[in-house]
Each structure stands twice: as structure tokens, then as C-alpha cells.
Image: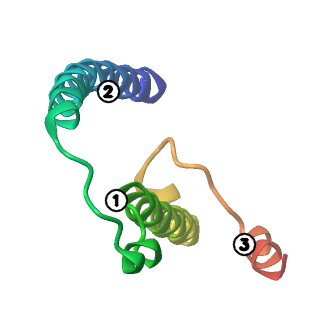
């Protein structure tokens, strides 16, 4: 039962991501057409030497997402370790929870 529920949640997430991707592709296509049109009529601007030291919007965005991914990974690791520490209790409350002995928990901490 738990596995079928998790599969259903996973499948729903995949469907939502697929729909989102389709919408994003449509927006990117429209923005690309508008950008191409504006770039054709926009004159070249003079170069600013200071602009070389400023990161591009893509670089800034990529760096921001890299940091967010690191925080998300750290948060996931922390949460899973916290849940593992709670297993002696959850094993008594949730009938399908995996039991962890105190020895196993101690050996995991030492590793």
C-alpha cells in the first residue's frame, strides 16, 4: 500500500513536471522570437570596460541555482538523518517503519 501511494505521488510529480516543461517551452519559444526581432532593430551599443567585470545574467542565475542545490542537498541529508534518529519511536508508532537498533545507530554515527 505504501509503495503504491509513493508511486502514485511520483507519477503525479512526473506529469506535473511534464506539463510545466511544455508551458516553459512555449514561453521560451515566444521570448526567442521577440528577442530575435528586437535584436535585429536594436543598434549596437558602445562597449563599457566595466561591463567585463560584471557577471552575465546566465552566470548569476547558474551560480544562484548551484547554491540552492547545495542547500537543498544539505537539507535533505539533515532531514533523513533526523528521521533515522527518530526510528526507535516511529517504529512503535508506524507499523511499517523500519526498526533501528541502538547499536546500529551508534555504528552509523561513528562512520
Q: Does dot 2 land on a helix, a strand or a loop?
A: helix
Image side of residue 102 versus residue 23, left or right: right
Q: Residues within 10 Å of mark 3 (few under 14, many from 20)?
A: some
Residue at disc 1, secondary structure: helix
- Of marks 1 and 2, the one in the foreground: 1
Residue placed under numbered mark 2 in the picture: 17
Secondary structure at badge 3 equals: helix
| Label 1 or label 3, whichever comes before in sequence order | 1
Quarter of the image containing the C terminus? Answer: bottom right
Which of the two labelled residues, at mark 1 and mark 2, occupies the earlier sequence position?
2
Is the residue under label 3 in contact with that under label 1 (CB below 8 Å)? no
Q: Position of residue 16 (x, y in %)?
A: 26, 24
Q: Looking at the picture, tell me which residue is in the foreground, 77 or 82.
A: 77
Q: Which mark is residue 57?
A: 1
Q: CA distance from mark 3 to mark 2?
A: 37 Å
Establish if 53 lies above or below 41. Answer: below
Amino acid at each position: 500500500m505504501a509503495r503504491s501511494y509513493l508511486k502514485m505521488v511520483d507519477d503525479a510529480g512526473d506529469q506535473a513536471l511534464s506539463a510545466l516543461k511544455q508551458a516553459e517551452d512555449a514561453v521560451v519559444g515566444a521570448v526567442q522570437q521577440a528577442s530575435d526581432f528586437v535584436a535585429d532593430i536594436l543598434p549596437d551599443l558602445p562597449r563599457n570596460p566595466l561591463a567585463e567585470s560584471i557577471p552575465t545574467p546566465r552566470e548569476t542565475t547558474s551560480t544562484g541555482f548551484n547554491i540552492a542545490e547545495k542547500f537543498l542537498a544539505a537539507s535533505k541529508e539533515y532531514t533523513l538523518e533526523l528521521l533515522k534518529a527518530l526510528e526507535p519511536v516511529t517504529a512503535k508508532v508506524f507499523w511499517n517503519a523500519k526498526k533501528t537498533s541502538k547499536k546500529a545507530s551508534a555504528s552509523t554515527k561513528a562512520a
